[in-house]
Amino acid sequence: MLPEDMAEIIGNDMRNTGIFQPIPRQNMISMPTRGSEIIYRDWKALGAQYVMVGNIEPAGGRLQARYEVFNVTTEQQVMSGTVGGSPDQLRDMAHHAADQSFEKLTGIKGAFSTRLLYVTAERMGGANTRYTLQRSDYDGARAVTLLQSREPILSPRYSPDGRRIAYVSFEQKRPRIFVQHIDTGRREQITNFEGLNGAPAFSPDGNRLAFVLSKDGNPEIYVMDLGSRQLQRLTNHYAIDTEPFWGADGQTIYYTSDRAGKPQVYKQRLGSNSAERVTFVGNYNANPKLSADEKTLVMIHRQDGYTNFKVAAQDLQRGNLRILSDTSLDESPTVAPNGTMLIYATRQQGRGVLMLVSINGRVRLPLPTAQGEVREPSWSPYLN
């Protein structure tokens, strides 16, 4: 087996997709570190399909891990690999090994080396609240602060290359949209219109930003070219149109609108005045997100009652809808770039927390995060 810390990280990564179910260490009959040490009958008795073995060795002040995956049924090697890094990069090494192994076994690119954005709100005494924009591993580990403010921060979103983020800040007591470069911290103000400035979303090419403005009296969706700052209005309706999300073609935007009386998801092409309704199950569907293959729409769906808000997934070909979460008061779903997992915000024991759910619904678990209220998660694209 790999060293315990690295093995645990890889095992958790594989488990979180809902596709694999790692065998607990205490149930293992033997613990090989290389292929020649594998006693296949032990693993067959445990019902294992694959065994991953490996070891870490020091190499000039760095670490080098070698890992192998074997098929228990055929007793043949499926893959092998090496990954290196400094001692403080053990998590990166483990996530990389998990990415490579997951892709080899499933044909799906691993998303374990991706990152997560989220917002925390912590009461500091009296009426003071400290808001922070955090960036962490996808599983909540190694969080770092990108922005700190005494005023609310909302709707953080990654650019397609993962190098920039857009968000809404209420500094100076009014909402404005900013774009910030992650590496340098340099940021620029994108909007400062009267009224609502909200819900930014980068286009697939990263050159445009969709967002919501109420400068003309009603919340509508606009698109701005970030180079020329030219503004294009997409929606024009007396209803509330909000929460834009781009389709992969860069020409279609999904959004939430209550134009039918209750919030539902619509889609509309740029330059068109015609909106097509996408959701019909239930009287509340909002905050749409698409899987990378655009076959699944993830959203917040209200079941019976006024406060029973669940994360749901709709098959866009068949139209059927599945409830994925077992919590209520859910909000802000965000989908992994390979579509195998999603993270959302909800409340537990009176506190805002983040939950991870596999898209097949088999895994549901809370993410470790900082103190205070945690909300507004946003999953990064692939970063390598």
Image (spheres, grey):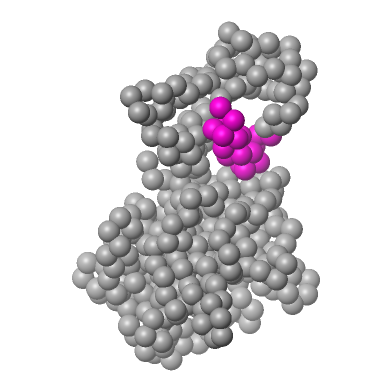
Residue range in magenta is 3-21
Q: Is residue 58 left or right of residue 10?
A: left
User: Between 270 and 40, which is closer to the camera in this rendering?
Assistant: 40
| x and y, in percent, of residue 43 in the image | 71, 18
Res 151 visible: yes
| x and y, in percent, of residue 79 in the image | 50, 19
- Judge whether residue 17 is colored magenta: yes
| x and y, in percent, of residue 185 in the image | 30, 62
Dividing the picture into quadrants, the one containing residue 1 is top right
> Residue at 38% of width from left, 45% of height from top?
383
User: Between 157 and 217, which is closer to the camera in this rendering?
Assistant: 157
In which quadrant will I find the C terminus?
top left
From the image, give the main secondary structure of the stretch colored magenta. helix
Res 107 visible: no
Q: Hey, which residue is sitting farthest top in the picture?
A: 36
Q: Is residue 363 left or right of residue 242?
A: right
